[in-house]
Image (cartoon, rainbow, N blue to C red):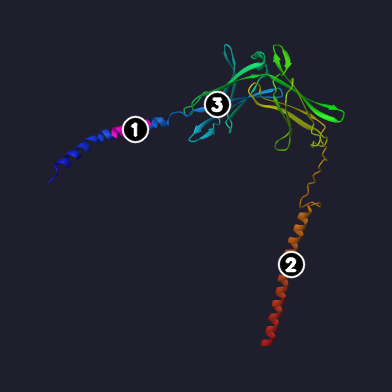
């Protein structure tokens, strides 16, 4: 006979199955909705003044799992912020490093600058996958001039830095750190670092560094990552470097009469080995024939 308690429990389980599957479906839909929620993006803005060129660089990234990834091929809008709102400068797409780079027109900068201070913003409108983000900064216009001086036998690099105060340019009062470099083949070689004093800094010229065949050498001065002025750099060249002898390259090929010696020697060795094997084979054939005739004569 069937146990009535077991029968009652089985009926309860059977009646609760629809409720269980309904709750399961709701949970799956909730997880799916959570999975489709846009990912938060991060947007950072930097300002560069390279000689007289002003450049904005926005870096766009988002966190996927535990790591941040750079967002490529997404448009970033660049604006100048004024009292009445924002003035659009234009847009630029991010590259493989998540960087959108935009050069600020000089006339736009001067038109919307107040006492040399200008406000910028970079806006990412977002997509279905990534949330919108924006960043902003304020910079003061800094002008640097790089020149060279010589006192007796000592050669020096002179840098002056000024900023606008009303309609006048005045020396920088802040003790900014200036880094000096000389371009090398794959990097910038540091030659000194010193703080501004009354808007001026002087360091010795590196006379022991090589220049080109005429002794020309470029010097770069930089203010890097400053909260007030951003990243500012200026460069200038002078023929105070060590002149290098001009290298004359000779194009030597295998078919030329002036082929490289290593190639000539290699070819001679290879041909000698080949001819040695030819002679050895002919000599072996001669010995085989000789021994064959000798064996034939002994058997007769």
Classify the position of the C terminus by image quarter. bottom right
Task: Give the residue displayed 65% in from the left and 17% down from the top.
Answer: 109
Quadrant of the rendered image containing residue 264: bottom right
> In the displayed structure, would residue 109 be above or below residue 272?
above
* Residue 287: mark: none
Q: Earlier in the sequence, mark 1 or mark 3?
A: 1
* Residue 43: mark: 3
**Which segment is the magenta one?**
21-30
Q: Earlier in the sequence, mark 2 or mark 1?
A: 1
Task: Give the residue displayed 68% in from the left and 19% down from the top.
Answer: 141
Quadrant of the rendered image containing residue 20: top left
Q: Secondary structure at mark 2?
A: helix
In the image, 82 versus 229, the foreground residue is 229
Q: Secondary structure at mark 3?
A: strand
On whether residue 23 falls in the magenta region, the answer is yes
Crowding near the residue tagged with mark 3, few <14, some 14–19, many ≥20 C-alpha atoms within 10 Å = many
Crowding near the residue tagged with mark 2, few <14, some 14–19, many ≥20 C-alpha atoms within 10 Å = few
Residue ID for mark 2: 276
Q: Secondary structure at mark 1?
A: helix
**Which label sits in the foreground, 3 or 2?**
3
Task: Give the residue displayed 50% in from the left and 32% down from the top.
Answer: 63
On whether residue 238 falls in the magenta region, the answer is no
């Amino acid at each position: 006979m069937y146990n009535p308690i077991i029968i009652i429990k089985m009926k309860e389980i059977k009646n609760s199955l629809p409720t269980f599957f309904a709750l399961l479906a709701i949970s799956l839909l909730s997880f799916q909705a959570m999975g489709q929620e846009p990912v938060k993006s991060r947007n950072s803005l930097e300002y560069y003044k390279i000689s007289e060129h002003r450049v904005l660089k926005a870096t766009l990234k988002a966190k996927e799992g535990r790591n941040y990834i750079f967002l490529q091929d997404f448009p970033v809008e660049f604006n100048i912020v004024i009292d009445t709102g924002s003035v659009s400068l234009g847009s630029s797409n991010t590259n493989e490093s998540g960087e959108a780079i935009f050069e600020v027109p000089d006339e736009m900068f001067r038109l919307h600058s107040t006492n040399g201070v200008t406000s910028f913003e970079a806006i990412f409108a977002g997509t279905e996958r990534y949330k919108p983000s924006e960043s902003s900064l304020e910079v003061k216009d800094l002008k640097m001039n790089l020149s060279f001086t010589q006192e007796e036998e000592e050669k020096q690099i002179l840098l002056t830095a000024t900023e606008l105060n009303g309609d006048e340019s005045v020396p920088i009062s802040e003790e900014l750190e200036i880094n000096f470099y000389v371009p090398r083949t794959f990097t910038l070689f540091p030659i000194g670092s010193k703080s501004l004093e009354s808007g001026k800094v002087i360091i010795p010229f590196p006379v022991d560094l090589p220049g080109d065949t005429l002794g020309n050498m470029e010097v770069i001065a930089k203010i890097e990552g400053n909260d007030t002025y951003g990243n500012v750099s200026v460069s200038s060249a002078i023929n105070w470097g060590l002149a290098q002898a001009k290298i004359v390259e000779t194009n030597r090929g295998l078919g030329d009469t002036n082929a490289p010696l290593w190639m000539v020697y290699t070819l001679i060795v290879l041909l000698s080995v080949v001819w040695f094997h030819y002679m050895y084979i002919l000599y072996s054939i001669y010995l085989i024939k000789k021994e064959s005739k000798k064996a034939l004569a002994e058997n007769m």
